[in-house]
Amino acid sequence: MSIRVFDTYKRNKVEFRPLSPGQLKMYNCGPTVHDFAHIGNLRAYCFADTIRRWFENRGYDVLQVMNITDVDDKTIRKSREKEIGLGDYTEQYRKAFMEDLASLNILPAHVYPNATDHVDDMVRIIETLLEKGHAYRSEDGSIYFNVKSFPEYGNLSGKRIEDLRVGERVRSDEYESKDDVRDFALWKAWDEDDGDVFWETSLGKGRPGWHIECSAMSSRHLGPVFDLHTGGVDNIFPHHENEIAQSRCSLDADFARHWMHVEYLIVEGRKMSKSLGNFFTLRDLLEQGWSAREIRYVLVGTHYRSQLNFTISSLESARQSLARMDDFKQSWSSWPEGESTPEALEALERATSTFDAAMDDDLNVPQALAAVFTFIRSVNALAVEGKTSSQFAADVREVWTRWNHALGLLEADDFATGEEIDSEWVEEQILERQEARKAKDWARADEIRDELLEAGIQLKDGPQGTTWKKI
RNA sequence: GGCGGCGUGGCCAAGUGGCUAAGGCGAAGGUCUGCAAAACCUUUAUUCGCCGGUUCGAAUCCGGCCGCCGCCUCCA
């Protein structure tokens, strides 16, 4: 029973080996709170959540830290444009982010550290790097990391320093003060574009560079060595490469033992961008009438290392798939009193072992879902033959709960809906319709059926009577 | 220019050397029903972009070609 993961650093699936057996210390690259999260961002957080959930399922004691970047070029620029203080500006998006996570049934991380609360830690790391000769101060007072001082630079991303395309995307005049264009900023000296955003520190008046916060916050909350670091593939270079350089050089420690990265999300086959009009935040989709549960289904339904093509039809498909799960769950109560049959237990055994093997093998959620659906189909077939029972319903419920903890999808109740339905009224309507049907008053019976449908209630007439569900 | 990924049925999506190529959606047929709907069951890829090669055996490995995509300084 071991978990295998694809480790970006080793470029291979490896057996996950925690520092302390049974413990997962994980750092997830979180959001820069300059705007609402879009579904591409949210895929990354669903991914982190899936890791957390599966390790818990396997009995790990998980300590999860996800940073909040609340100071960087964008947050400063946008808050100044809006003439709002940086803290007030980022706070609204931090709050929105937390709401999004909750809607998507993402378990809260144990710590959400803010970059701005860790400037002292960053300063200490930078001081150490200066002392050790890995960093230098430029003419304007900014401090840069000297990439050439770290021979392993490029190992994570597979890039060699010499190959980097110098000056392609960056106007070199912005970097006149750097010794080498590939060096990256640890500390940015204050300039007037920063307005009132600065810290007076031993390094001078200024603010941290982008990468240093993660080095500071991970070691502060998880220690210099921890088990797993995650992020989007776009973080591999330069962000995580730079983090490794900073952390290893300053802490004299290995830093993260494993690295996992989630692939990009595209929309309707194209890169998501505002100009193409295919840019979605969670809020956009909720407004269009999709549920957070449906969105989560789509986000976790493609293996995390594959590009995910997010489409409206995939949401429709998710809606139907989830309904199938819910219908299955609802069927348990109709199974007759009795013991579990051997056939039923065998189906359950097969499903759990397939599910576990899939998740243990680099978190193969699509395969785990397939195991769930195969199970549903075979049990439905057994139910037709009368081979399901109340005892089996209890057996299934137990496994279902465990599966739900892993996937966060199986229970509709986990997703707050807000709307309550007056079930007493629905029952009354159903009774009245039964009377009408007995009297063969089909017009009245159909009228009631239509009214309920109008109210979002779908009736299901079966041999055992009429049941209903919300649609 | 450098590095990397992908191309599987109408759509989505697993599988990366060997039992019948998972699963979901859709579609078709059936059961049920006053009619429906819903639900459930059954069926739905001799084939994995194309062409060669390696192998007893390839969707899976190798080479070439075609198409799509990502990264190469602040984007998950």
Image (tube, coloured by chain):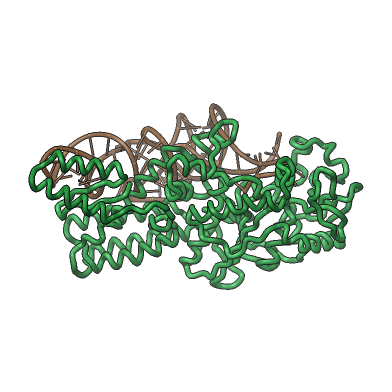
Chain colours: A green, B brown
| Coordinates of residue A258 in the picture (x, y in percent) | 61, 60
Q: Which residue occupies the foreground of this view, A191 or A419?
A: A419
Residue A146 in percent (x, y) is at 83, 52
Residue name at image x 63 percent, y 54 percent: A29
Compared with B69, A101 (above or below) is below
Residue A255 position by quadrant: bottom right
> Does residue A424 appear to the left or right of A432 in the view shown?
right
Query: Looking at the image, which residue sits at the far left?
Result: A439
Look at 76% across and 66% down and name the residue there. A252
Q: Position of residue B27 (x, y in %)?
A: 27, 34
Residue A245 at what x, y percent from top left? 75, 56
Residue A146 seen in the figure: no
Q: Looking at the picture, tell me which residue is in the foreground, B44 or A445.
A: A445
Say above or below: A432 vs A332.
above
Q: Residue furthest right?
A: A139
- Name the residue: 29% across, 41% down: A454
Q: Is residue A431 visible?
A: yes
Q: Residue at x 31, y 64 (%)?
A: A396
Q: Give the left or right position of residue A339, taking residue A168 as reference.
A: left
